Amino acid sequence: MFHSAARIVGCLLLLFPLLLSASLPAREEAGPTPKAYNVVYVGTPYDVISIMLEMARTGKEDLVYDLGCGDGRMVILAAQKYGCRGIGYEIDPEMVRASEANVTANGVQELVKIVQADMFTLDLSEASVIMLYLLPELNRKLLPQLDRMKPGSRVICHNYGIPGIEADQTLTYLSNEDQTTHVMTLYTTPLRRTAAARQ
Ligand SMILES: C[S@@+](CC[C@H](N)C(=O)[O-])C[C@H]1O[C@@H](n2cnc3c(N)ncnc32)[C@H](O)[C@@H]1O
């Protein structure tokens, strides 16, 4: 009696890791490869986002994209302030979940959508405002996609601009939230190459 009970317990102990791994969703566990994450998450302070939205002349009719939306704050604030639609694209499944929770917590589900995607695979032609807080080489890599935006669309960058592109406006601002100086750069489509970039 004791022997057979011990054998059952032994079998269960051996099977436990197998049962546990079978209960995890395989794709979610794997997620995108680390290679696809081009920059880590750092949130833009809200007072900086407000200025970026103003610089981009955001209005109710705009469709705002944030490429690498982190916790979704840029598109959420745009919807709250201007009543415009927004899509936050994010590659990291954990940040996608955080963004979706934020959208719900702020009651902007009618206006804001969060999509898990690699930004370099996107068609950006529908967006009228694109917000970026990425590194310069990533902004440059996005150029073929940004070039397909409609004329008069705006691209607004936090801290890092688009190398080789003429800016309409650059603004430096000391944030009340993190007591740090932030630089914001505005571009309007069609994007104009600088003289150096044209050579
Ligand atoms: C510096 S954070 C900016 C977050 C947000 N835009 C903000 O300003 O508060 C950059 C975000 O880009 C995401 N990211 C990195 N590579 C990406 C890719 N290839 N496609 C989509 N998102 C990406 C990161 O996971 C991170 O959340």
Image (cartoon, rainbow, N blue to C red):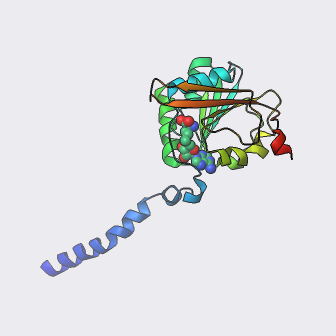
Residue 81 placement: quadrant: top right
User: Looking at the picture, how far across and down is residue 19, in whole percent?
Assistant: 37, 66
Query: How many numbered discs, if any?
Result: 0
Between residue 96 and residue 161, name the one nearer to us: 161
Q: Residue at x 37, y 63 (%)?
A: 20
Look at 48% across and 58% down and name the residue there: 29
**Of residues 183 and 9, which is closer to you in this image?**
183
Tell me, yes or no, if residue 108 can be seen here.
no
Which quadrant of the view contains residue 74? top right
147 horizontally vs 120: left or right: right
Q: Residue at x 68, y 43 (%)?
A: 139
Front in this rendered view, residue 182 or 35: 182
Occupied quadrant, residue 10: bottom left
Q: Quadrant of the N terminus?
A: bottom left
View quadrant of ligand 1: top right
x then y, percent, for residue 152: 80, 26
Using the image as rendered, state which of residue 149 and residue 166 is in the foreground: 166
The residue at 13%/78% (across/down) is 2
The image position of residue 113, as x and y in percent, is 60, 34
Residue 163 in the image: x percent, y percent? Answer: 72, 42
Is residue 16 visible in the rendered image? The answer is: yes
Q: Is residue 82 left or right of residue 71?
A: right
Location of residue 23 with respect to 144 vertically, above or below: below
Residue reaching furthest bottom?
3
